[in-house]
Amino acid sequence: MKVSVIGATGYAGAELLRLIYNHPKADLVHITSESHTDEIISALYPHLCGICDKKLESIEDIEKIGADSDFLFIGLPAGHAMEIGRKLDGLPVRIIDLGADYRFDDTDIYEKWYKVRHTHKEAKRVYGLAELYRDKIKSAKIIGNAGCYTTASILAVAPLVKKHLVDVKTIIIDAKSGVSGAGRSAKLPNHFPELYDNFKAYGVATHRHTPEIEQALADIGGEEVRLNFTPHLVPMSRGILATSYATLKDGVTADDVDAAFNNLYDGEFFIRLRGRNAYPETKYVRGSNFCDIGWHIDERTHRVIVLSAIDNLVKGAAGQAIQNFNIASDFDEKMGLDFAPIYP
Amino acid sequence: MKVSVIGATGYAGAELLRLIYNHPKADLVHITSESHTDEIISALYPHLCGICDKKLESIEDIEKIGADSDFLFIGLPAGHAMEIGRKLDGLPVRIIDLGADYRFDDTDIYEKWYKVRHTHKEAKRVYGLAELYRDKIKSAKIIGNAGCYTTASILAVAPLVKKHLVDVKTIIIDAKSGVSGAGRSAKLPNHFPELYDNFKAYGVATHRHTPEIEQALADIGGEEVRLNFTPHLVPMSRGILATSYATLKDGVTADDVDAAFNNLYDGEFFIRLRGRNAYPETKYVRGSNFCDIGWHIDERTHRVIVLSAIDNLVKGAAGQAIQNFNIASDFDEKMGLDFAPIYP
Amino acid sequence: MKVSVIGATGYAGAELLRLIYNHPKADLVHITSESHTDEIISALYPHLCGICDKKLESIEDIEKIGADSDFLFIGLPAGHAMEIGRKLDGLPVRIIDLGADYRFDDTDIYEKWYKVRHTHKEAKRVYGLAELYRDKIKSAKIIGNAGCYTTASILAVAPLVKKHLVDVKTIIIDAKSGVSGAGRSAKLPNHFPELYDNFKAYGVATHRHTPEIEQALADIGGEEVRLNFTPHLVPMSRGILATSYATLKDGVTADDVDAAFNNLYDGEFFIRLRGRNAYPETKYVRGSNFCDIGWHIDERTHRVIVLSAIDNLVKGAAGQAIQNFNIASDFDEKMGLDFAPIYP
Amino acid sequence: MKVSVIGATGYAGAELLRLIYNHPKADLVHITSESHTDEIISALYPHLCGICDKKLESIEDIEKIGADSDFLFIGLPAGHAMEIGRKLDGLPVRIIDLGADYRFDDTDIYEKWYKVRHTHKEAKRVYGLAELYRDKIKSAKIIGNAGCYTTASILAVAPLVKKHLVDVKTIIIDAKSGVSGAGRSAKLPNHFPELYDNFKAYGVATHRHTPEIEQALADIGGEEVRLNFTPHLVPMSRGILATSYATLKDGVTADDVDAAFNNLYDGEFFIRLRGRNAYPETKYVRGSNFCDIGWHIDERTHRVIVLSAIDNLVKGAAGQAIQNFNIASDFDEKMGLDFAPIYP
């Protein structure tokens, strides 16, 4: 398959190049950047030296890039992917967008939270969270790759809402991410001395991943979900840990909870259930496409607490994109992703 | 005042020595350690070289140490302080215990969570969270210094329960701590490569600080509290950030919440209210006795989210102990604690 | 003494405000910033909230600021302090410049390495490394506060060159600094994910602190010095460790080396000699004005290796400035600096 | 090829398991641990869950393990591998020892620095630094895999000594390593809060990698080498950066130096020459088998300064072992190692 990476100079773009390098059936044809057009990617990311020394192109001639490619991976800020999607509507090229443009069924929600007018509302698109939307992804023209926080959050809570074990009005997701999730733009808040040996919350009750989580959980559970999602920044490079809380419905037992997880994720290679009273750490999954999940039933408060860990740049971005690419290409879902995490 | 530090080789003990060095009215007379008896403290903590080069004694002759001292600061594992307290019952020396032995009104709760029989149930003791128990601390013989997580948690939620603004059954506290909170014993989970670039939860729904938070909030609000408290380990040395959630009662407004914080903490030097929609970071308070607090009202979910930050070794341990010492000695409460945080 | 901080929004400026707050005889009158004029310093540095909430002024009216002040601390990029110095030549105000403008006896060297024309060559100035230039500092009108790397380097090697124990042509200084030394400007190389879990050299054989070290060592030893100085960036906030190598002259013994250190630094409060075969760590001095020094004699190679550690923002900048201020004001040299490092 | 990992629970052992998992021609048959016999490796290293869930065996029956295996990778403390080597002398199994037992031609040097009697002096062995000893490795029965610091150091200096461009008496290697190099045993010096935000030297002039570097450089250059090697600990998990200094012989030009590097490493996939005035960072190679090298000629001091970076657990241990395994098995040298570093 011929693949191109549009917006290759962000962290997710660079991670895609790492993963494509080891994918036996993905052939990289174009990489683009508007701010670094004509530069060599390995000059910007020296770790890629000898791995990927391709020249960055502009998207000015996106039609040609689209015509050359079977798949486009897009890693651009909100609002740009839909422009590309619209332009390439008539071409057979398929799109996996790592941004938010194609994640929402209801574009009003997108417009409200992203403050951008949606210009490709009619696009046929599917939500790209592989384990939960696999069947739709197979034949999709456009895949809206799930976000990083949302992947960790939805996978943690989905079994509970699917089996109606919890009161959806009580869901609270307290999430913590490494700093690579904030992108590669140098800004004072992400300046090394400001974050090192520091911990903070941000975007409290206003983060854009909130409606994305709500949409998926509502879809899975069949009832509207309104929840609290609080992101925090951990002084580390990679990894997300989400701590999710929900009140169990009356009569729900610990065994019911165990069964819900085991049933939904039976046979899923990339979901590693740690089980009840076992908690994943972000380091367990670093560099890999795994999502590790553990949970606890608190008899005192009748709550279930779920811990889920992913690498935000892999299962939360580039790895999931490759997984979706594999599904959409009818390849083995693990192709190019079947490697161990890096520890320590 | 003559002070001694019993159990001086833990991180809280060493932090006490740092603070006592700059306290104009505290005169250090004895420091003890059973595992390092007769060693010089600055050999174990080279940063103290030239600051405190005292020899560590054993507590074998605790009666003499007690007789020599106006105040004992105790930094020992659960179960040891109450033995000392019992032995010194007849002496005028006052005790500030940095451990849990004297924190609980109901020693059954202590015994249940700490799995230790309480041997000094009759002790006259007060809970040592200065801002909320100042009057009782003044004349206390024994002060059970508040724990680190609990200080951050209680100070964050106290205004809400005091004014009955939230449903106490909905309180969830998701807390994150630097690793110094786990003490100085070398164990695999706290081995550098295991924690670096890593984030995890631990003690989910079973951490011993849970009943301590519940006790104080129940006391303040006048109704029983049963909440979820989840501690996490941040790859940093110092600092706690607590993210507390609670559902607002019907009709409670954002102004009510603001007023509750402003009223309770009016004039408190060590509480810095960041206000609504402003969130503290652990680095804002590093090395200092401040507790910084900000909050957010989420209209969508009718919840209030409170962010509170402390340095776990200062306001969460040694600093609060000095603050209690000042109160109990009728000194200016800021004495020896009136300095800026270290940034960055 | 009335003091003002010119260029208060850099890390060294903020550290000065921390130290001045606790100095019993320094009264802060003005703080300035051109990029943040009229803003409150604690809005830029929230850790200073309640500690220093002063408004930042412009230096447009530097004459008035100079007239109001007994001392100016200047923390501006190379080239600006000498302009201020020139303007204030006729006023009694004394200047402690944390930058490089007044560090060089030979302004040609300054111009060559800093690529800036020196506009105040006639200034009466002294080099502000307190332990080695104390007598001159006492009455100086302008003090060129020693740089961070240079302080750690010079203090490590000075005893050896002073006593002519080493071949000065063989000196190599391999230094490592925390990232706060690079300032507060957000740039890609200092973006958190780029540096975290990373280590690198920079400015190899071209760093501007090289001639400053050479000047001082030549002055102390009485012969020209040309050495290699290699700075590296450590993924931490604060601290410098310098590893210095030099070949011992024939016949020089380990005792000679010990004596050289002991003699030169006898009675120096801020120099803590760890001794032979004992090595300081940056954490031993964090937040404090100490310089800790240890050394090793390698019989196999006839070299001496000296390890020296400072906090780059304290002994390497603001703390040394206060120390110089104390000397110049005839105060106790420890005033406002007599506190313990923060550990861990 | 059937391979076994003897001593699989150290960091290098676990890293071997990660790499073997993706090696198309290595079939893992046994893994051993004396302290965790009968445990499942993924219970000790949860990141390996689903990747390697093998049970750990004892080496009591090492003869059987040896008989079952084509290759043994040994990751045991000094002194143990030679016992195994001796026992298996008669078997066809080949040994790649990640420890020091088989690294020295002159076992007296080993005994002197390691304080262990060598019990297998007659072993036919080769030094396992692939780029420099490839031909001998091909047919070796026992390969003494090069150490981590030594790999970074030797590869940096080898071109200079091979071409006789530097005075070998002037070589100084100042090296910095992440903490995983210190192993997985929990000890106070490597306890998280002790090292975090800290930097230090250790083993100054006494580190055991010194004679290993000297042996290889003497072998390559044909003259005895006695140098200074100083290791430091960087607060990060992985990575080594070595800064090497040597005085150029008279008449040696920058072009000579460039040519020496280009000639020696021409065609070497795992050596990435950054060139003159370009410096590698440890993050450029993290998780990979690359060694990146850059250098600088200082005209002022007539020294060359070489910067080299590796991942200590890959090129410095497990990756180099696989590279040696490939060479010894007549496989493509890149097999199982041809992947990108992880960034950021």
Image (cartoon, coloured by chain):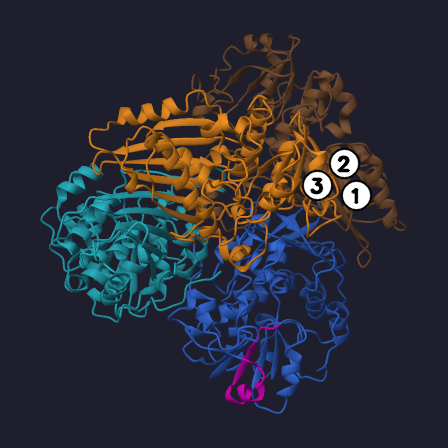
Chain colours: A blue, B brown, C orange, D cyan
Give percent across and percent down for residue C317.
54, 38
Mark in the foreground, 3 or 1: 3
Q: Specify the label residue B217 is tagged with.
A: 2
Residue C97 occupies which quadrant of the picture?
top right
Number of on-image labels: 3
What kind of residue is marked 1?
A: Val
| Above/below status of D94 relative to B260 | below
A281 is within the stretch colored magenta: no
Judge whether residue A148 can be spotted in this image: yes
Q: Earlier in the sequence, mark 1 or mark 2?
A: 1
Q: Specify the label residue A259 is tagged with.
A: none
Residue numbers of the magenta segment? A58-76
Gap in Å between the C-alphas at discs 3 and 1? 60 Å
| Above/below status of A226 relative to A119 | above
Image marks 1 and 2: residues in contact by CB distance under 8 Å: yes
Gap in Å between the C-alphas at discs 2 and 3? 56 Å
Give percent across and percent down for residue B55.
46, 16
**Neighbourhood count class around disc 1 (C-alpha, 10 Å): few under 14, some 14–19, many 20 upward:** many
Q: Which residue is mark 3?
A: C63
Judge whether residue A337 can be spotted in this image: no
**Neighbourhood count class around disc 3 (C-alpha, 10 Å): few under 14, some 14–19, many 20 upward:** some
Q: A329 or C95, which lies in front?
A: C95
Gap in Å between the C-alphas at discs 1 and 2? 9 Å
Farthest left residue in view: D122
Q: D58 or B172, which lies in front?
A: B172
Please state the chain letter of the residue tagged with numbered disc 2 in the rendered image.
Answer: B
Q: Which residue is mark 1?
A: B168
